[in-house]
Image (cartoon, rainbow, N blue to C red):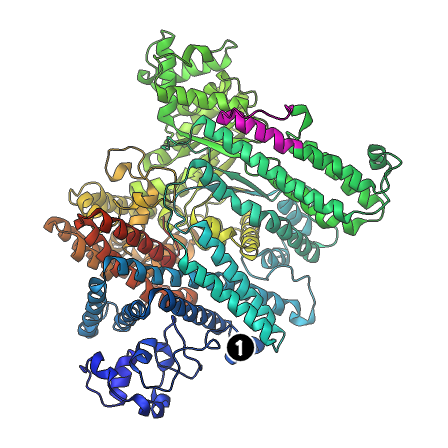
Amino acid sequence: FSSLFIIKKLVNIPINFGIAKMRAINFSKLSSIRHHAVGGQKAISPFLNCASSRHWLTPTSTNMMTNCNFRFHSSEGASLFHDDRISLAKEGNDLDKQLRSDVKTMGSILGETIQHFAGREIFDKVESLRLAAKSWRDAGAGRDESQKEACDHAFKSMCDTAASLSNQDLKTVSRAFAHFCAIANAAEFHHRSRWNEHRLAMHATSDGKNTSSAMIPAEDSCGGVLPQLLSRGDLSAEQIYQTLCSQQVELVLTAHPTEVNRRTLLDKHRRIQELLTKADDLRSKGAVPNFEKKVVNDSLKREIGLMWQSDELYRRKPSVQEEAERGTLVVETVLWNALPSFLRKLDAVMIDTLGEQYSLPLESTPFKFSSWMGGDRDGNPNVTPDVTREVCLRNRIRAATLLKNDLSEIAGRLSTTFCSDELREKVGENARAPYRVYIASMIEKLGSTIDWADQELRNVQGSSQPFEKSISVSDIYLTKNQLLDEILLMYHSLNDTGNKLTAEGKVLDLIRNLSAFGLTLCPLDVRQESTRHTEALDAITKYLGLGSYAEWDEETKLSWLQAELSSKRPLIRTTDWKNNDAFSETVKDTLDTFQMISEQHDDSLNAYVISQATTASDVLAVLLLQIDAGVTKPLRVVPLFETLDDLNGAAETMKTLFTLPAYRARIGGKQEVMIGYSDSAKDAGRLAASWAQYETQEALAGVAKEHDVDLVFFHGKGGTVGRGGNPATFNAILSHAPNTINGRFRVTEQGEMIYQNFGHLDRAQRTLDIYTAAICAEKHTSRQSPTPKWRNLMDTLSKISCDAYRQIVREDERFVPYFRSATPELELSALNIGSRPAKRKVSGGVESLRAIPWIFAWTQTRLNLPTWLGVGEAISEVLRSEDGDELRSMYNEWGSFRTTVDLVEMVLAKSEPSIARHYDNVLVNDAKAKELGSAIREIHHKTENAVLDLAGHKTFCETNILLQRMLQVRNPYVDCSNVLQAEILKRLRDCESEEEEAVLKDALLVSITGIANGMGNTG
């Protein structure tokens, strides 16, 4: 019940009694009925709180109480230090209550802020929507026929409120819900750290044993995995140690446009989390001085107030350079500190668990970081060779600056006069503070490195500004080993002179950062689609009078490519194509890209990824173009297999390559292959794609073993399930096919996931911990492989699901019109969150749409179609067949399959077909398209039943209490954002006024941000 309903019932006011009449009532007698509102606390608005924690009336109710003695708000009501919070902190036995209190307090401050800057009327509209959404949820959200009347009434109330708003008010009210979801996210992120700290504290004194307590003893943490592996009895400490020392995770940061929040707001969200942490620390000490309370409370109000007054929207698309700067900012601001801190903790756990002699080696690199930002030119014409040159140079400037700052700090600390003889030789006998003198030369050289990179940058940009002096590469650090050798000399000198503790402080952290990030911070991958290389070679063969390369068959291509790779003469000179009109601009761009690669110094670039790779010639083409451009150390060539057909043909392609002497001679027994999770799922549906990815990795691992090639898989995953993501990283890694990881794991971290996983120091360290624990556990965990029966069953499931998926997405002529009218897909291009176009080609339908906007659009309407479409049909059909029992056994006994199904179940739990139906009712005008929408929702309903049946669950994710609580809190706010968005889209598509169109576009983008924040992901 809403508070208004409770008030009317308790004071015998007719339910249909209007608000205007309510305002005229003397509410003084309400004070006597306060205690009768059992459970009334649930109705308290998270947007505003009363002065006392005993007050149960919502702001909507208090607005009516003109003559009431209760105050609308007091500064104490919006405090992180009210009496209940202090007692909760002391008890420490219900941390979830602390989370709810945090959200409630910040919601209260947000409510005050909205009233102050937008007015009471806007606040009342926000509350009206929220209460109606809550009533709708309480009435079953369209899933409970017995409450249909109450449900329809509540939903109509939401729609009527949205329809009554002006265009400007639509934007303002949408902002309220978007910001609430954002601060709720901040509170939840902080709460995870709070839980981890609580578990660490409990572990520190468990069983009376005081352990290192560097990491939590969880099943997905090194603090739990290492003791568990050792306790099994079949592994020695030495074996576990060797695994940890040899394994490596490489995280590739990509600028895929899925982070909808501006950096300005992300910074505010981060500072809010820091304030929540500070409040926890103060409360844990007991009585908090009033001054300290005020400082923290005022700071929190300040951040939320400034957040409300900030522009949430990107007003223009970022340049590629800006995009790269945003993406690598997390390295400079978080990972530079988080990585050495994590490695210090890992070292402590290794010593504590395995023994004193098993310390993490000095230059061990369990993690490397790379980037696609500035190198990924697939379908993005904005990534030119000069742009890549710029980003590489800027990365060198950032890395050198970080290293220089750290060395300056170390120099300030190292005032000791003692050093080794070797270091003394470097600085001279008269150096009173030898380390400072030694470090000064490194700082000077790093300064020259920065100046050199800036000089080169201005040359690339065509600047006419003269240089003060020309700097030669002989005066700078070009490779990390040049600097690392000098720092190691200092490290060993400190150890040799009895200063081991000093050596293992900031100096050790610097060594580990330099080992991980080098002098280029994040080396770039170059990515381009295979057709661009075919086009370039076709132009070259025509110019040379050899015919059309594009028209040759695969055998002819391979024969010619091998011959050219074995030849010492150049294929074509730069002067032949640079100013030659016979070569198109795209061909010149492709050839200039290889020219750019040849100019780069060590570690600036990493790998060359070929998207849409299908044949062996696609790989040889890139190798040849590199060598012909003069690349002395060719980048490793990584084919990306994306579509279902590409995945199914990948093993045969690589087998062909491994039998070619010209290719084997150049790879040094090592090969990397990228698996595309996004496009394969978009092509065939989630279930068919998952099985194809699993089988492909198995087959490729077998081919590599047969040809004695060390194979590393590069996993191109997004944040959402529809793009290969899995919020349970540890389980996701262990669900990979056995013998396909082997201690090496390369994976993309995309868009909003970069901030979610690495945006805060504690969160970044926890993410690194999970990856490390998972890769170690995966190598030493025996897992069930699919039996022949299960493989046949998976083939059947895959075929049924793929056919069902494609029947809707590809074959139904109603689908494209439905998709484009029922979702904000057409409007997403206005969301200026990435430099890359939404489509690889300007023309084309869904097949040319990138996987991100494909997922993004369906996430916004809460239907999440790409993740579940086809799954229900496959499961239902097999459950009804004679293989039904075998399918249930497969789910219960095979972890990989169970993980896939459970992920679909999680997405179904987050889906809301009633919301999707509302989009159809408001936005879809074509009768046939509406029929399709209704049919899709019926398929969704059957899929729900099929998944629940297979999982043996009565409700979705019934064992995942955390997810249930999250959805319970968030759903009403996301529901409101959806209703507002549908109204905005309706008006926007009918709008004829440019001025009003601008307001509505802003409102739409705000609603998109709100839904993305509420759902926890975008694309």
Q: Residue at x 39, y 73 (%)?
A: 48
Residue 24 x/y as whole percent: 24, 85
Question: What is the x, y in percent for residue 40?
Answer: 35, 82
The segment highlighted magenta reads: 448-472
When the figure is inspected, residue 153 is found, relative to residue 457, above or below; the finding is below
Q: Which residue is mark 1?
A: 88
Helix, strand or loop for disc 1: helix
Position of 313 compared to 196: left or right?
Answer: left
Residue at (59%, 61%) from the top-left corner?
216
Q: Residue at x 56, y 61 (%)?
A: 218
- Left or right of residue 183, residue 295 in this image: right
Magenta span contains residue 224: no
**Along the horizontal axis of the image, is 1016 left or right of 493?**
left
Q: Residue furthest left?
A: 927
> From the viewer's perspective, is residue 47 above or below residue 433?
below
The amino acid type of the residue labelled 1 equals Leu
Mark yes or no: residue 434 visible.
yes
For label 1, the crowd category at 10 Å Cα-Cα, with few meaning under 14, some 14 to 19 and many 20 or more, is: some
* Extreme-right residue of the structure: 429
Residues 634 and 209: in front is 634
**In front: 65, or 54?**
65
Quadrant for the N terminus in the image: bottom left
